[in-house]
């Protein structure tokens, strides 16, 4: 989360009207509206690689991947947000207040950055755990080939796994597929966010 356009509380209807005309994406949390941070070139490379990899693996199956423009509602937390990539298992369940928002993610991907990592690993992860449909939460580093995967069976406790190295695969058990890290990080230059993006632009 970043700065809010106003300190006053907004209704959901006001937020949705505001978001419809906004040039950037915003989160809504318990009546407050927060501008979301913009993404680097490398962030977009990684997110695009994940989406296209999943699109290929899941073609013809009931699960479907969506990019960063799909709003997700965590009703118990009072949150509307956007993920970097999300997979919906089966028919999409639309929010009753916002038919363009999904309420049943099965897998959520967040690409970490300096401005969002603490939130993605902390409060946002707490919010996501309130989604009954969620089976896997995947945090993807930009600075090295390293992925953190949280996973659970239905009704079971959350477990943790670290996958590191371009020769490794990310297993997504709830989807029945694997993503090679070499595919996730295709065309990505590692290093600090600033230096990696600068080297790509030269």
Image: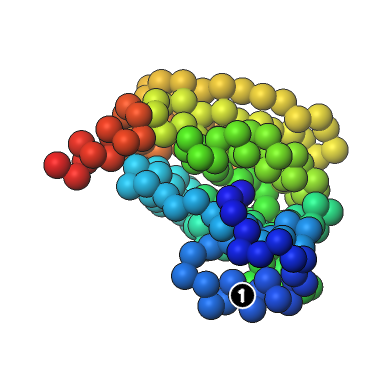
Say which residue label 1 marks.
18
- Mark 1 closeness class: few <14, some 14–19, many ≥20 residues within 10 Å: some
Nearer the observer, 105 or 124? 124
Q: Is residue 85 left or right of residue 38?
A: right
At 73% across and 57% down in the image, what residue appears? Answer: 29
Q: Position of residue 107 (x, y in %)?
A: 63, 46
Residue 201 drawn above or below residue 195: below
Asked whether 163 or 54 is in front, the reply is 163
Residue 10 left/right relative to 197 = right
Would you say residue 63 is visible in this rendering?
A: no
* Residue 118 % position (x, y): 60, 34
Q: Quadrant of the C terminus?
A: top left
Residue 192, given in percent of the width and then of the height, sits at: 35, 29
Q: Is residue 161 left or right of residue 98?
A: left
Q: Is residue 156 above or below residue 134?
A: above
Q: Is residue 93 above or below residue 52?
A: below
Q: Nearer the viewer, residue 42 or 194?
A: 194
How many discs appear?
1
Question: Where, by quadrant of the figure, is residue 35 drawn?
Answer: bottom right
To which quarter of the image does residue 117 belong?
top right
Q: Residue at position x 51%, y 23% from top?
A: 163
Which residue appears at 54% of the width and 54% of the height?
Answer: 36
Q: Identify the residue shown where x is 51% and y is 40%.
A: 115
Viewer-proximal residue, 9 or 64?
A: 9
Q: Is residue 155 left or right of residue 195?
A: right
Q: Is residue 30 visible?
A: yes
For residue 138, which quarter of the picture? top right
Secondary structure beneath disc 1? Answer: helix
């Amino acid at each position: 989360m970043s700065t809010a356009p106003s300190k006053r509380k907004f209704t959901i209807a006001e937020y949705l009207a505001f978001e419809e005309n906004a040039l950037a994406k915003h989160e809504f949390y318990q009546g407050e509206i927060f501008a979301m941070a913009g993404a680097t070139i490398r962030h977009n490379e990684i997110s695009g690689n994940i989406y296209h990899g999943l699109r290929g693996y899941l073609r013809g199956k009931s699960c479907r991947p969506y990019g960063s423009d799909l709003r997700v509602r965590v009703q118990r937390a009072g949150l509307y947000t956007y993920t970097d990539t999300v997979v919906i298992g089966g028919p999409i369940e639309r929010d009753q207040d916002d038919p363009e928002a999904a309420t049943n993610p099965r897998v959520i991907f967040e690409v970490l950055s300096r401005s969002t990592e603490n939130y993605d690993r902390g409060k946002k992860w707490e919010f996501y755990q309130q989604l009954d449909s969620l089976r896997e939460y995947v945090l993807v580093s930009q600075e090295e080939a390293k992925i953190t995967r949280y996973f659970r069976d239905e009704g079971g406790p959350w477990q943790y796994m670290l996958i590191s190295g371009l020769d490794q695969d990310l297993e997504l058990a709830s989807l029945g597929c694997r993503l090679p890290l070499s595919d996730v990080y295709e065309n990505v230059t590692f290093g600090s966010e600033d230096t990696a993006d600068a080297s790509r632009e030269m």
